[in-house]
């Protein structure tokens, strides 16, 4: 059985991150809200979105605010042995 994939778009700013979601396949994109630009807020978001067993795929614009966040997120994901992945656009 294929796992459900949720795509998470992150618009990273200095203090906040705007979050948009899309279901795997050709699902509609919807605004999910805004979170603080902190490692703890990203961890809470990841846990919340993966509760239903979804595989999470993160994507963000590779600007000066986003790249350090990806490195931080990847370190946490790898330390838990999670299967999430990300991309820069």
Image (cartoon, rainbow, N blue to C red):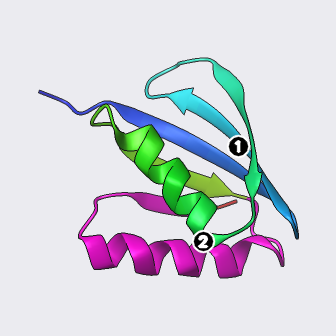
Name above or below for residue 38 compared with residue 44: below
Name above or below for residue 43 compared with residue 81: above
- Is residue 77 or residue 85 the one in the foreground? 77
On-image quarter of the C terminus = bottom right
The reply to whether callout 1 and callout 2 are in contact (CB within 8 Å) is no
Is 67 positioned to the left or the right of 57 in the image?
right
Of the numbered discs 1 and 2, the one sitting upstream in the chain is: 1
Q: Position of residue 70 (x, y in %)?
A: 59, 73
Is 1 positioned to the left or the right of 24 in the image?
left
On-image quarter of the N terminus = top left
- Is residue 62 or residue 81 the one in the foreground? 81
The residue singled out by tag 2 in the image is 39
- Distance in Å between CA atoms under marks 1 and 2: 14 Å
Q: Position of residue 59 (x, y in %)?
A: 61, 54
> What range is drawn magenta here?
61-87
Is 83 positioned to the left or the right of 39 in the image?
left
Categorize mark 2 by other alpha carbons within 10 Å: few (<14), some (14-19), many (20+): few
Going 51% across and 54% down the picture, which residue do you hit?
Answer: 44
Q: Which mark is residue 55?
A: none
Going 47% across and 52% down the picture, which residue do you hit?
Answer: 46
Going 37% across and 57% down the picture, which residue do you hit?
Answer: 84
Categorize mark 1 by other alpha carbons within 10 Å: few (<14), some (14-19), many (20+): some
The part of the image, by quadrant, that contains residue 29 is top right
């Amino acid at each position: 059985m294929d796992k459900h994939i949720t795509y998470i778009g992150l618009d990273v700013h200095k203090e906040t991150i705007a979050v948009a979601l899309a279901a795997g396949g050709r699902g509609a994109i919807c605004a999910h809200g805004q979170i603080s630009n902190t490692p703890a807020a990203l961890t809470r978001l990841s846990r919340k979105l993966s509760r239903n067993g979804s595989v999470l795929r993160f994507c963000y614009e590779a600007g000066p605010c986003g790249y350090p966040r990806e490195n931080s997120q990847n370190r946490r994901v790898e330390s838990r042995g999670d299967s999430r992945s990300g991309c820069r656009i």
